Structures are given as C-alpha cells and as structure tokens.
Image: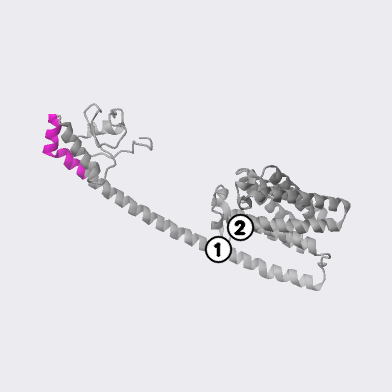
Amino acid sequence: MVFVPYEFGSSLFQYIYPHIRLLGSLFLVGAAMTLVALMYPAWPAFVGWVGRAFLLVAFAIYWWVVSVLPVSPTGTILYLFLMVLFVMERRTLRRGQGLLLVFISSVTVCFGGLMAWAPQDFQRFAMAPLGPYLRLVGILFFMTGALLVVGLWRKHPLFCRLALGVQGLLFLNMAFAVAARAAWAGMGLYSVLSLACGLLATVRRWPTLSGVRWRLFRGMALASVLPIVGVGAVASYLAQKALEVELRAKAQQAVASETAWLEQTALIASSLLRVQGQDPGFIALVREGNREGMQARVALLENESGLFDAAWLLDDVGDTLVFSGRSVRAKANFAHRAYFQDALKGGAQVLLSRPFLGFLG
C-alpha cells in the first residue's frame, strides 16, 4: 500500500484508494511498533499498546470497506477473527502462548462450511479460478479445521500436524487462485497463512529467543530494516507524487487539445449553418413551401458535411417542417425547448445548446 499503491486500483478498493497510502502507513507503523514491543519486552508497555491500536484501526477500516461493503465472505470471516483474537492474544502472550492455532482452526472451519454450503458466493470474487472444485475445497477445509479443533482439545500433536499440513496446501492453492486474478493482497495473505501452517506442521521445537545472538539479531533488525523501510516509503511517496504530476499534466494537455478541436468544429458548424440560412435559394424554397427542396438542403447538412448527426427545419411555432431522415422524432414539436426560445430571440445568431437526444431518441 505504501510502496506500490497503484496495485490497489481495482473496484474492490474504490472506497479507500484515495487514502490507500495513509492506510498502508497505519499498517506499517502499527506492525513495526508491535514487533519492537515483542522483541524488547522491557520497553514501556505503551509502545505495544499503541502499535496494536494502530493495527486494529487499520484492520477495522480494511475489513469494513474491502470485505463487508462488497460482501466478500472470505475477508469478512478472516479479518473479523483476526481482530477479535488480536485483542485477546495480549493476555495469552504473558503465559508464553499465542492464538495462531485457534485463529487457523476458526477460519478454516468457517471457510469450509460456507464454501461447501454456498460455493457460488465465492465464485463472484477472486475464487473464480477454483470453479467446480470450490465445494471440494470447502469440505477439505471443514474436515481439517474440525481435526485441528479436536487435536487442540485433546492435545494430540499428530492430529494438529496432519490438519495443518493439509491446510497449508489448501491455503497455497487459494494463493495461486487469487494470484490468477491479480489480487495481490489476497495472495500475500494466503501465502503467509500457508507458510505458517507449514512451519507449525514441520517444526517440532522452536528456538529459544534469548542469549547474545538474539540480542545482536534484534539490534541489527532495529538498526537496519526499519530505516530502510522508512527511506523506501519516503522515496516511493515522492516518486508517486512526481508520477501523478506528470499524468495530470498529460491529462490537462489532452483536455486542452480536445477543447480546441471542439471549439473549431463548433465554429465550422456555426458558419455552415449561417451560410445555409442566408442562402437566397434556400430562403426562396422556404417561402414557396417546397418541402422536397428543403428536404434536400437539410439532408446535405447531415450527409455531406459530416458535422451533424441529424438536422431539423422548424417553423415559428416549433413544428417540424422537414428533417434529415434518420431521427425517430420526425414530427416532433420543439417549442417547449429552451434552445428554441433562445433561437427566436437571437435572430440570425447560431446558438449552441446542450444535447437533447438520448440513446432512445
């Protein structure tokens, strides 16, 4: 969102796209502060609280605008569980336990139930590439989610590892599916979930984050990664602003060229109408009531000049005397139109009015 905001230009992000960089900054700052609070537990507690508050606000906005309003079932379920468990996890971390397994089991059970029950609701969005296999994917999600719940309840690691291994493959499949629709946000999310399931299924003993190596690593991370991210964000912002200025200048140039062309075309059309209206032969045809001659003259405006889509010759009460031949409103009366009243007051002046014909004539 911060570095490549133009990747979020799809209709799904239409409500937040003008503020996509601000939302990305909220995600970035909140995640950075939360990571710092986890790596340095001795730091003041408000660092972690502020970081989590930023993330919750960003998640809430993203969940409502991108998932709830467009009625996206996957995003609605996933981000709702994410926010709820993110708030609850603060207490469990004090005991050295996280809620990642609870999050994965809750999401997969809900995903599976909805996919198996109403797969057509998922085909409208980025899950369309899965097509007829959506119900099967839903059944597998539900069964592995239920197996993971049983494994957590019974504290049976084999059940948990088996369920997580299958879920990692299912999330990877979903990542490829959304990538086929160029939904990069969904691809990143499901890729992280697939990687998390793979690590939880294969790693039997996690390393202890303590000692000299850990302190050196977190110091290097804080001193190198965060400044690089900050500088990159500023550079991306300046580059995006320069690109927007260039595109705006090109758009203004295109509008100016189009306006000049329209003004020239209107001037030529006005001159042609003025010459035609002052032609003695045409005036004589009107006075004699020669409809065939008037019809031929009006048809020339449409067929020969290329400036008019249709042409009418009206009398002083707004009734149609002759028309060019293509309109379905051949016998219409235009006395109630504002441009007809202006034409009566303008004498020989050629007036431009707003278009009065729609798609249905």
Q: Residue at x 58, y 61 (%)?
A: 3
Q: Is residue 260 left or right of residue 114?
A: left
Q: Is residue 97 above or below residue 210?
A: above
Residue at image x 71%, y 56%? 170
Query: Residue 179 has which mark?
Result: 2
User: Residue 77: horizontal and vertical position, in percent?
Assistant: 70, 46
Give 340 or 284, whichever is nearer the viewer: 284
Name the magenta segment's main secondary structure. helix
Mark 1 residue crowding within 10 angstroms, few (<14) / some (14–19) / many (20+): some
Q: Is residue 84 magenta?
A: no
Q: How many marks?
A: 2
From the viewer's perspective, is the residue at label 1 or at label 2 nearer?
2
Quadrant of the frame with the C terminus: top left
The residue lying toward the viewer, choosing from 179 and 265, is 179
Part of the protein shown in magenta? 271-288
Residue under pointer 1? 236
Residue 15 appears left or right of 247: right
Residue 299 visible in the picture: yes
Q: Which of 357 and 177 is in front in this view?
A: 177
Say which quarter of the image contains residue 352. top left
Residue at the image point whose x is 17% and y is 38% from the top: 277
Q: Work out how far the residue at label 1 is from the one at label 2, CA to CA, in angstroms.
A: 24 Å
Task: Answer whether residue 276 is magenta in the image.
Answer: yes
Place of residue 97 in the rendered image (x, y in percent of width and height, measured from the top left): 83, 56
In screen coordinates, is 154 left or right of 217? Answer: right
Amino acid under disc 2: Ala
Q: Which secondary structure, mark 1? A: helix
Q: In which quarter of the image is residue 247?
A: bottom left
Q: What residue type is labelled 1?
A: Ser
Most distant residue in the front direction: 132
